[in-house]
Image (cartoon, rainbow, N blue to C red):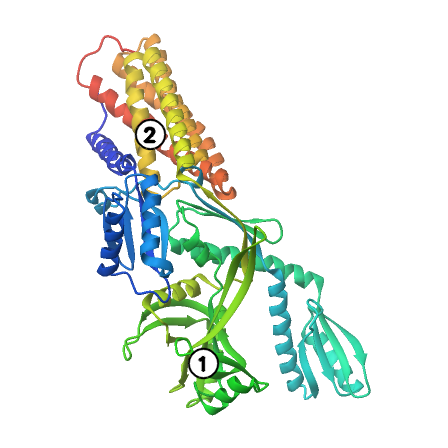
């Protein structure tokens, strides 16, 4: 009789139920949709915008599933991609340039499944379509920033050493280092020794001199330049990952190509406009010492005459465009922020960004505010955008940097690590800025030099082919097992089917992105999963030939085959783990699918088949087995 315990029956039933529930969302095909978000100066999304969009679609007789407002976004669903495109064109015409209209695939999974955390498996670029960006990192900007930093440090060093100098500034010719101008040969010699001892990454040499001007050149060493270049790429990769994760794109591909390029692939993003705005942006904040307040006489005079004090920059306030003089001295920048979140100022009711500084930034901010209570401090919003124009039939991209003051207020008391910045135009602008700051600042600007959109129709063709491959492989394996092993083969077929169901359920639950290599991993998993049942069936046959009773043969077959099955799957698991941990992109996707498939196969091929076999044969007398 059967010795299969009842708790294992319960376990098998629960796992089968789990597989069915969490694999079911993949049967619901997502609906083509259009997502609308408000740009910086546009009115926020509200019911009036919803009515305007509904009226525009009805006017052009474009059928839509639903038009709903979700937070600060509006979503309109359509029956197919052709109607989706027509709907997007109609919405753009109705709303104008103040809103970003992007394509999207909206999940159609029922609410009761979503309530238990069930969701469809995200699809990769090759299955779902999406956008491909090739981005060029501006390494020259890194060199300029580093030379400016060295210039500041050298000025501080010379002041500490009481060495008088005329000026310390980055050379006009790019990449030629920092020029230090002194008044005597003795000062130059002292400066040379001090700089060489303090900054070992600089090559210091004498430059041309006149009767009263002695020049010293400090140039960054080649090995330091290589380290800077490598670090820039690494930081940009990490920053882009943070920003794209905030977009909600599942398992994006972000990797380095060559010395100064980065490849970004975003599955499911059919309109690249919103993604480009976020991943290419270099918006950040600079906290600077203020010289005056907006519209004070000195600022108005500087704006009118162009005579700006040498220690100041002339900026304009966001919104009012009032001139304001701001010190060139930067206290902290966005690079020193560790966290940022958007909110609302409790006193003024205006949008703000709550920021948290790292230890170094907190010390600098604490020292400055403690020494300058009652004086102004300006918050400068720095944004770099790329202006794209068509010249002679070619796309020309021109970087443009805008700097505006969003806040210029009096320091009421000392603060350091945590504080808030107000003066932002809208809640969405505060949210976008917080997202950029939290994701980190790009170490160097990036320009998109190549852009491709992979249509959803091509992805659907890949899905159809992948589905046919899985079904064909599954059908052939099921047929071969049923013919050769009869009833035991049919039990193995049921286990193989549930292996596929549980594999899809686990991948969906943990959010594994399915790609074509992942489909290959599923097909390979199904092929390998039947091996365990072949071993079990052959062991049972062997026991029957040796004269064992049917029940004893079943028991011995599972016990003796287990060690062989475990050994074989452990070696497969090690290989899959190596692919997962060391591989990237398609290789990693294949490894993850294979690793999950091996684990599910161990359960279904042994425990699930044993449960079904015990259920069929366990409570009746047997003369032989259909194996």
130 relative to 216 in the view: left or right: left
Q: Position of residue 55 (x, y in %)?
A: 23, 52
Residue under pointer 1? 378
SS for callout 1: strand
Q: Position of residue 458 (x, y in %)?
A: 43, 35
108 relative to 278 in the view: left or right: left
In the image, residue 274 above or below residue 118: below
Camera-nearest residue between 274 and 582: 274
Q: Are marks 2 and 1 in contact (CB under 8 Å)?
A: no
Comes first in the chain, label 2 or label 1: 1
Camera-nearest residue between 274 and 514: 274
Q: Position of residue 268 (x, y in %)?
A: 39, 44
SS for callout 2: helix
Camera-nearest residue between 599 and 623: 599
Report the label total.
2
Q: Residues within 10 Å of mark 2 (few under 14, many from 20)?
A: many
| Direction right: furthest residue | 211
Q: Residues within 10 Å of mark 1 (few under 14, many from 20)?
A: many
Q: Quadrant of the N terminus?
A: top left
Q: Which mark is residue 224?
A: none
Residue 1 seen from this side = no
Front disc: 2 or 1: 1
In the image, residue 622 above or below residue 163: above
Residue drawn 33% across and 45% down? 86
Residue drawn 27% across and 14% down? 487
Q: Which mark is residue 500?
A: 2
Residue 474 seen from this side = yes
Kindly indicate the quadrant of the structure image that contains residue 512. top left
Q: Quadrant of the C terminus?
A: top left
Q: Position of residue 229 (x, y in %)?
A: 62, 59
Measure how far apart labels 2 and 1 are at the Cα level: 60 Å
């Amino acid at each position: 009789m059967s010795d299969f315990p009842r708790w294992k029956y319960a376990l098998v039933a629960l796992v089968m139920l789990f597989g069915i529930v969490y694999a079911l969302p993949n049967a619901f095909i997502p609906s083509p949709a259009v997502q609308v978000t408000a740009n910086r100066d546009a009115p926020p999304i509200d019911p009036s915008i919803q009515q305007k969009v509904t009226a525009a679609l009805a006017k052009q007789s474009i059928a839509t599933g639903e038009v709903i407002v979700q937070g600060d976004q509006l979503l309109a669903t359509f029956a197919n991609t052709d109607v989706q495109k027509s709907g997007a064109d109609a919405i753009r015409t109705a709303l104008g340039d103040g809103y970003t209209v992007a394509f999207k695939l909206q999940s159609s999974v029922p609410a009761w499944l979503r309530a238990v955390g069930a969701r469809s498996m995200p699809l990769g670029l090759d299955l779902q379509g999406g956008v491909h960006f090739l981005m060029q990192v501006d390494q020259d900007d890194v060199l300029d920033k580093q030379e400016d930093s060295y210039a500041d440090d050298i000025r501080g060093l010379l002041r500490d050493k009481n060495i008088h100098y005329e000026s310390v500034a980055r050379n006009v010719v790019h990449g030629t280092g920092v020029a230090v101008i002194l008044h005597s040969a003795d000062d130059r010699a002292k400066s040379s020794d001090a700089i060489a001892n303090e900054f070992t990454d600089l090559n210091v040499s004498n430059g041309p001199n006149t009767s009263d001007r002695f020049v010293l050149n400090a140039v960054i060493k080649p090995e330091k330049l290589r380290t800077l270049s490598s670090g820039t790429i690494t930081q940009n990769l990490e920053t882009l990952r943070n920003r794209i994760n905030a977009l909600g794109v599942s398992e994006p591909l972000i990797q380095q190509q060559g010395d100064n390029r980065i490849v970004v692939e975003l599955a499911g993003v059919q309109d690249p406009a919103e993604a480009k705005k976020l991943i290419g942006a270099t918006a950040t904040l600079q906290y600077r010492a203020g010289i005056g307040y907006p519209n004070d006489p000195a600022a108005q005079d500087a704006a009118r005459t162009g005579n700006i004090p040498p220690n100041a920059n002339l900026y304009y306030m966001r919104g009012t465009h009032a001139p304001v003089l701001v010190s060139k001295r930067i206290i902290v920048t966005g690079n020193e922020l560790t966290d940022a979140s958007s909110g609302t100022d409790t006193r003024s009711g205006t949008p703000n960004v709550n920021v948290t500084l790292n230890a170094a930034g907190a010390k600098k901010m604490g020292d400055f505010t403690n020494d300058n209570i009652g004086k102004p401090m300006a918050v400068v919003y720095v944004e770099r955008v790329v202006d794209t124009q068509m010249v002679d039939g070619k796309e020309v991209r021109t970087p443009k940097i805008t700097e505006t003051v969003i806040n210029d207020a009096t320091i009421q008391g000392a603060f350091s690590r945590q504080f808030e910045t107000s003066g932002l135009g809208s809640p969405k602008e505060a949210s976008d800025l917080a997202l950029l700051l939290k994701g980190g600042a790009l170490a160097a600007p990036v320009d998109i030099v190549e852009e491709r959109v992979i249509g959803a129709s091509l992805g659907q063709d890949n899905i159809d082919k992948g589905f046919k491959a899985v079904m064909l492989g599954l059908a052939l394996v099921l047929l071969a097992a049923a013919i050769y092993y009869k009833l035991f083969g049919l039990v193995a077929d049921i286990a193989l089917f549930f292996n596929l169901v549980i594999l899809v359920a686990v991948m969906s639950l943990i959010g594994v992105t399915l790609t074509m290599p992942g489909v290959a991993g599923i097909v390979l998993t199904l092929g390998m999963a039947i091996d365990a049942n072949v071993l079990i069936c052959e062991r049972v046959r062997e026991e029957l030939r040796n004269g064992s009773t049917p029940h004893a043969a079943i028991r011995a077959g599972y016990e003796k085959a287990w060690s062989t099955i475990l050994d074989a799957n452990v070696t497969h698991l090690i290989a899959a783990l190596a692919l997962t941990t060391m591989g990237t992109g398609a290789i990693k996707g294949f490894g993850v699918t294979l690793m999950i498939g091996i684990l599910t196969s161990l359960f279904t091929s042994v425990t699930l088949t044993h449960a079904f076999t015990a259920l069929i044969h366990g409570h009746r007398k047997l003369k032989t087995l259909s194996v």
